[in-house]
Amino acid sequence: AHSGAGTLQLTTNNLTVTSDFANSAGTFDLNGLSWTMTSAAFSNAGTIKLQGIETITDLTQDASNGTWTYVGRNIAENISITYFSGADYNNLIINDTNTNKATFQNSAGLSINGTFTISSGTYDANGQTTAVGGLTTVEGGTYSASTAAQNFTGSLTISCGTFTRSSGQVA
């Protein structure tokens, strides 16, 4: 369990969890390393930070709480967003502040219960649906919509950055 207000960062080895894992506060940073949950429950009231290249295995997502933040790794590359069964995320942030920014791609239809924020970097819907229950904010970076529907139940706000629409419905 991680209950501190600071950051718990993996530094050398991949992580395998065989008992319950609770990120009840602060940030749990995968730092490019893989994470396996083996018959273990997961809860997340804090933030999970990842570059996007990590392999996450057997995790049953806590899609009612917490935030996941994709930050890239200073390589201009396409990275597929991690998907989970049911709703994929509660809150999701794309915030790649590196010089060489990744493009975070949707490859299976993305479902977010809470908020979706693009602060820096690019989110590419990539021909897939995106459904957001809360507010979607583009406050920097780029949101590239697609030929599939982009559903913003909680509305879409663009304060800075770019929203590029395609032929898909934006609702």
Image (cartoon, rainbow, N blue to C red):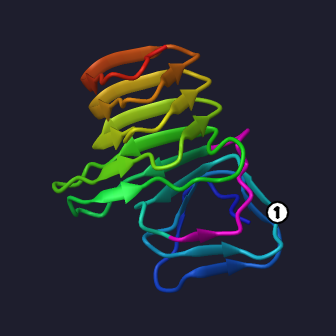
Q: How far from the left and from the top, in percent, is residue 121? A: 28, 43
Answer whether residue 58 is magenta in the image.
yes
Q: Residue at x 54, y 40 (%)?
A: 110
Q: How far from the left and from the top, in percent, is residue 1? A: 74, 66
Q: Is residue 130 found left or right of 38 in the rendered image?
A: left
Q: Which residues are magenta?
A: 55-66
Q: How far from the left and from the top, in percent, is residue 33? A: 48, 75
Q: Give the labeled residue for mark 1.
A: 41
Q: Residue at x 26, y 25 (%)?
A: 164
Closest to the observer: 34 or 6? 34
Give the residue type that dot 1 points to: Ala
Picture layout, residue 115 above or below residue 24: above
Q: Residue at x 67, y 80 (%)?
A: 16
Number of numbered discs: 1
Closest to the observer: 131 or 142? 131
Among the 4 quarters of the image, the one containing residue 56: bottom right
Picture layout, residue 57 above or below residue 160: below
Q: Residue at x 43, y 71 (%)?
A: 32
Q: Is residue 125 found left or right of 163 in the rendered image?
A: right
Q: How far from the left and from the top, in percent, is residue 55? A: 53, 71
Answer whether residue 41 is magenta in the image.
no
